[in-house]
Amino acid sequence: MSEKSVTPIIDVRELRKIYFLEKIQVKGINNVSFQIYPGDFISIMGPSGSGKSTLMNILGCLDTPTSGQYFLEQEEVSHLKENQLATIRNRKIGFVFQNFNLLPKLNAFQNVELPLLYAGIPKTIRREMVNSLLEKVGLSQRKYHRPNQLSGGQIQRVAIARALANNPSIILADEPTGNLDSRSGEEVMEVFQKLNEQGKTIILVTHEQDIAFHSKRILRFRDGQLEKEEHVDTPRKAEDFLQSAKETLEAS
Amino acid sequence: MNIFEKFQSAISNVLSNKLRSFLTMLGIIIGVAAVITMVSVGQGMRTNITSQIQSLGSNRLTVRPGFSRVPPGTGVMQRGEMNIFTYDHYLGLLNAQIGGIKAIGAQASTNKVITYEKEYTRTSIIGTTPNYPDLENFKTSMGRFFSQYDLDHMTRVVVLGQTVAEDLFGNVDSSIIGKKVKIGDVSFTIIGIMEKKTSMGMDRGDQVFIPITTAQKRITGNKYLQTITVETKTIEDMDSVSDYLNAYFLRKFDNDPDKFDIMNSQDILDTVTNVTGSITLFLVIISGISLLVGGIGIMNIMLVSVTERTREIGLRKAIGAKTTDILSQFIIEASVLSLSGGLIGIILGILSSLIVSKVSSWSTTISWPSIIYALGISVAVGLFFGIYPARRASQLNPITALRFE
């Protein structure tokens, strides 16, 4: 699917990010270039210190590169100001994090509502949107539960619903299954795969090989550079795993 | 997110930490309650004193010898000449027919022993004019005050104050009228008893009143008098009459302004208003310090809250909150804290000034300006002390904030 589209949704060219940690120069990423096309499902892998978090922050418009160019939907965003970046994060990118994904004092509904609030969408429309988003991730019944009343998998699904709120073209997930058991992890991956089928571009940062094999393409990083890019010929289907798990459960 | 929704979310945040929010508000609550109570007590005090002064008679100018004054540069109180005014000055004023004057009175006073049979007491003998009851707003309760006839003919009649009458006769009743008492060696006929009166905390019963002409001839033996009292027709006449009196006495006393003093009842009233105003201001400043401390408390808690919620701020920023969104979130939260503290403080302040007026004899006046002032100050405190923590929150870097443990 990715090859059909000529214009990449993400196009980074010679991206560099240099940090100063106690006056010592640290290269976060060094001369990285790649393209991501609409409908892609990418996994970014690499050991710690490989620069994948730095890259993730730049791709998510949380940070700007020291040099190089970043085109997001053909718009050069590498030199935008904080408030402009905030707007891009709000409209074009949906985030799912590993930890502290939801605000603990707000219930599921209110958490999903947040990006819509910041986008300035009126209340009545907002309510409808949040309801349909929660339905999409199968949590209509848990609308008024707070995060401490939800399981890890449910929290991540609420986070996904929130990430989808402003209908962004890209979902950026940073170790979304890192704190989950394999079954909940598969559930989350199932949601991602369904979203990908519906046309969302998904970028996943993970260090788990199994999880990475759910995606269509894997970018491996080492020492701040893109080491290797591989295609996954037959991505693992989370649906199949869940089906077989269910059968095992019924059989026993 | 409109302003209403922002307030809603701030309120729910404040409510989610009830004890801490309450303790934070406490400084503001106490400060506002103190300001309102102090202002209402101060205003009550002013009303009390003003009405007391007015009960002495309004539109009054009192001319007295300038016997106690501090000459410039010396810093030492000097006692000037007591005996400068004479009955002729009084008559001169009376005959001058000055516009705006309603009545003129004169007083010559001395201390003497007054005797009835074997009872005696030492008291102030006031020689004065028949218009004294009107001028001083001090009437007889029995019998009559002396008349112009008594003044003109220097009759030996006396009007006793309540305390003097009690000292001499025990029971005060109308049988006293007509009895004879001696002031010094001179025999006087009692024609009336004054009503009970205290003004400014002083008993005015320990005095007896005789015609000033009789006093000068029989008691003091000289032509001097101590006070000339002038009542003007209206308050507006006070200045012009005061000027006239000043010019008149300057002429009499070789242009020496130190010889006499003209006291204006309006001036006294103004002085009292000034003094109570300063006292109130002083109290308000002290309670204002409590407001300041309360504000610092709010700032402190807001700073703690920003640190505690670093990851929340990071997350909000990641999903699209702008700098101004975070800034307004925290400022509104600080304002909600201080505003609700202010409202609770107003209620407490009103209650406590009601209690003060019930328990003590002070009547308190709760004024709208003090309520509005207190409310305004508390909002201002919230805004002022909320800005710094809010700025700190809004300028957090989302990446560091998200990684914050």
Image (cartoon, coloured by chain):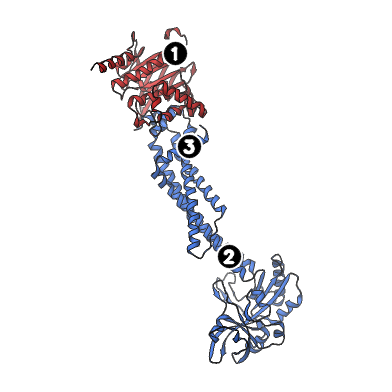
Mark 1 residue crowding within 10 angstroms, few (<14) / some (14–19) / many (20+): many
Q: What x and y, as percent, mark residue B67?
A: 60, 76
Left or right of B10? Residue B46 is right
Q: What x and y, as percent, mark residue B43?
A: 55, 60
Q: Is residue B285 above or below residue B116?
A: above
Please tell me whether mark 3 or mark 2 is closer to you in this view: 3
Left or right of A159? Residue B168 is right
Which shade is chain A?
A: red
Q: Chain of mark 3?
A: B
Quadrant (top left/top right/bottom left/bottom right) for the C terminus of chain A: top left
Please tell me whether mark 3 or mark 1 is closer to you in this view: 3
Residue with the most extreme left position: A252
- Please give the label number shown on residue B8: 3
- Give B168 or A30, whichever is nearer the viewer: B168
Q: CA distance from mark 3 to mark 1?
A: 39 Å
Query: Which residue was labeled with disc 2?
Result: B272
Q: Chain of mark 1?
A: A
Say yes or no: labels 3 and 1 on the same chain: no
| N-term mark: 3 or 2 | 3
Q: Is residue B107 visible?
A: yes
Q: Cβ–Cβ below 8 Å for labels 1 and 2? A: no
Q: Is residue B260 visible?
A: no
In the image, the chain rendered in blue is B
- Please give the label number shown on residue B109: none
Q: CA distance from mark 3 to mark 2?
A: 48 Å
- Please give the label number shown on residue A38: 1
Identified by mark 1, the residue type is Pro
Q: Chain of mark 2?
A: B
Q: Secondary structure at mark 3?
A: helix
